[in-house]
Amino acid sequence: MVSAVRSFLRVVLATLREIGDENAYQRHLTAHGLTHSAAEWRRFSEQRFRAKYMRAKCC
């Protein structure tokens, strides 16, 4: 029972990290050989938002 609850909580936490771009940020840091900083998070976030809103949505 306890292991089922832990598994469920791991899935929920992983989902929240994916939704909050934390996983993408970690992949970005790893790919570019960078370390976490407030400035890097800001740069990463601005890049993601710019790319997201530059794509025109149809219909």
Image: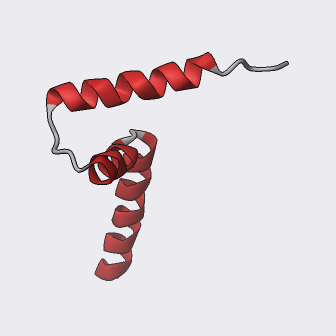
| Residue 45 position in % (x across, y down) | 36, 27
Who's the residue at 33% across and 52% down the image? Answer: 31
| Residue 17 position in % (x across, y down) | 36, 48
Between 11 and 32, the one nearer to me in the picture = 32
17 sits to left or right of 49: left
Furthest-front residue in this view: 32
Image position of 58 with respect to 28: above or below:
above
Image position of 34 with respect to 5: above or below:
above
Placement of the C terminus among the 4 image quadrants: top right
Between 59 and 37, the one nearer to me in the picture = 37
| Residue 15 position in % (x across, y down) | 44, 53
Who's the residue at 71% across and 18% down the image? Answer: 56
Who's the residue at 35% across and 65% down the image? Answer: 10
| Residue 38 position in % (x across, y down) | 16, 28
The colouring scheme, among rainbow, by chain, secondary structure or one colour, is secondary structure
51 sits to left or right of 38: right
Furthest-right residue in this view: 59
Between 42 and 19, the one nearer to me in the picture = 42
57 sits to left or right of 20: right
